[in-house]
Image (cartoon, rainbow, N blue to C red):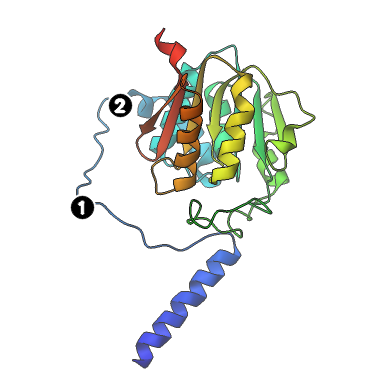
Amino acid sequence: MNAQIETTGIKRLIKSAFQGFGYDVVKLRRSKLAKPIDENYVEILDDPAFQASVKEVSGITLLDTARLANLWMLCRASNPSGSLIEIGSYKGGGALHISNSCPTRPIFVCDTFEGFGDLKIDPGADRHFKREQFTDTSFESVQAPWAGKGRDVRWVRGYFPESAENIEISNISFVHVDTDLYESTAKTLDYLRPRLIDRSVVVFDDYLRSVDGVVRAVREFTAAHPDWAAFPLFPGQGLMINRDWFA
């Protein structure tokens, strides 16, 4: 009994230590039905530019290869005359990867660069997130990998979309929304809708990954604006496009 109590205390101590650095410790669920992905003849995996980008951002993103591949291909499929934007950048790897896929296009990178801060976290819809997460970053560290690249990158610091009040954001055709929380996702979509051009693509992270707030915000948006349709992407992303793609 004492050994069990001691083990429980150690687990709590370890969990508390990780949370202090902005991480959480959870028990992962593994599907017994899962089988390895067949990588044979998957062209993007042999693309030298994609490989180089994945290697470059591997230490500054939580996105796995499959989600990075989706971002790469969908960004290139969006209207090439439009700008790119990522809302919720954490350490900046996702934004840099998106820019690597279309390096001549302007990109807006939007985040507090300090974690959730005072953002509203709904204990129901946002139950997998805690205020102390994602704090192990800084604006300077996110900026650093862009040095010398000559990219048209525009930094938007603060709580989006309030942070963009005095910034001209328009002509957007590719969006990566990784805000995690219900209210942030809903406000982001309302802000971006009039700023999206034809053949725009919106990709959500944490879609159908038990992050109820993101799914709720997307469903409410598509219900209010039936000209937009959302679809799941494996593993754990969502795709939203305007129905004019099918016109």
Which numbered tag is attached to residue 137? none
| Front: mark 1 or 2 | 1
Residue corresponding to mark 2: 42
Query: Which x, y percent locates residue 80?
Result: 55, 13
Residue corresponding to mark 1: 32
Q: Work out which quarter of the rendered image holds the N terminus and state it.
A: bottom left
Query: Which x, y percent locates residue 104?
Result: 62, 17
| Mark 1 → mark 2, Cα distance in angstroms | 25 Å
Q: Work out which quarter of the rendered image holds the C terminus and state it.
A: top left
Asked whether, in this view, residue 138 is left or right of residue 172, the answer is right
Residue found at x 57% / y 31%: 189
Residue found at x 54% / y 32%: 176
Q: On screen, 71 above or below 5? A: above
Determine whether the residue tagged by mark 2 lies in a helix, strand or loop. loop
Nearer the observer, 108 or 53: 108
The image quadrant that residue 159 belongs to is top right
Q: Amino acid at mark 1?
A: Lys
Asked whether, in this view, residue 111 is left or right of residue 56, the answer is right
